[in-house]
Amino acid sequence: MSAQGPEGDGAPRIPVLLYHAVMDDPPDWIAEFTVAPRDFAAQLDVIRTCGRTPVPVGALVAHLRGREPLPDRPVVLTFDDGFADLPGPTAEALAGRSVPATAYLTTGALTGSGGGSLLPPAPMMSLAQAPLLEQYGMEVGGHTVTHAQLDTLRGAALHSELADSKRALEDVLGHEVAHLAYPHGYNSVRVRRAARAAGYESAVAVRHALSSGRDEPYRIARLILRRSHTVRDVERWMAGGGARVAPFRDSPPTVGWRWYRRARAAVRGPEFAG
């Protein structure tokens, strides 16, 4: 039986996990959101033995849009940015356990992309390796060009972040890229409308919450993995607990933080979302 949603409404609780780098010695700026390979393997083993069925974001979106049913107890794994481990040991660990996943790539940060990004220095995969991810069974989505705080951008700058990343990935993959991840989860009504207008069918945020069968296709909730999280945390999430359940409205502190960042960006210009 599926773990049920809030207030007994029958909506299944769906863990959508957000990973970044999987490595032993990450740069300081991403260390908090990095999982060691040994811990990652242990988490994958929990996911494989907990009775949930791993599916990519595209399957969740098809369900949210009423096109296809989901397995009884789904789980979704996502990876942001495109660190160097992704098309190597991380993809191999997933494929070895038959776990599909979705990778959201920051195109300007990838080696050989010819672009630029606000991400601090780190070992990154190349844009040319994006098709390799699909060979491993991963779905590829966009994560903007520079990893800017999208909800502080306007007009042409916002459109460029969304459309140029999408186009770069489509050129190397040879097919449509339908899914987006907002850098650091930062979004707003205006950003969600822009994502739709740019041709994305869905977008994931962060929210550090469980998704559900009633979640919003343009701000799907994810649970962000930190290096301090344990196997026990993952077990709680797989059981449908340990976090609130989307959808829910943005809290007053979240709205206030957005307005503060907008004012700061008006003075300083685009800033790294992190």
Image (cartoon, rainbow, N blue to C red):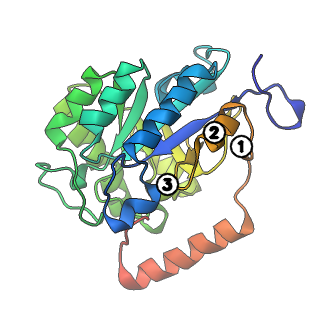
The answer to whether residue 39 of the structure is visible from this angle is yes
**Residue bearing the label numbered 3:** 227
Please tell me which of labels 1 and 3 falls first in the chain. Answer: 3
Q: Is residue 104 above or below residue 31?
A: above
Marks 3/2: CA–CA distance: 28 Å
Q: Nearer the viewer, residue 255 or 111?
A: 111
Q: Secondary structure at mark 3?
A: loop
Per the rendering, the mark at residue 114 is none
Q: Residues within 10 Å of mark 2 (few under 14, many from 20)?
A: some
Q: Nearer the viewer, residue 263 or 220?
A: 220
Residues at marks 2 and 1 touching, judged by CB atoms closer than 8 Å: yes
Q: Which residue is pictured at 73% across the width and 53% down the height?
A: 249
Please tell me which of labels 2 and 1 falls first in the chain. Answer: 2
Which amino acid type is marked by label 1? Pro
Marks 2/1: CA–CA distance: 7 Å
- Relative to residue 8, is residue 110 drawn left or right? left
Marks 1/3: CA–CA distance: 26 Å
Q: Secondary structure at mark 1?
A: loop
Q: In front: mark 3 or mark 2?
A: 3
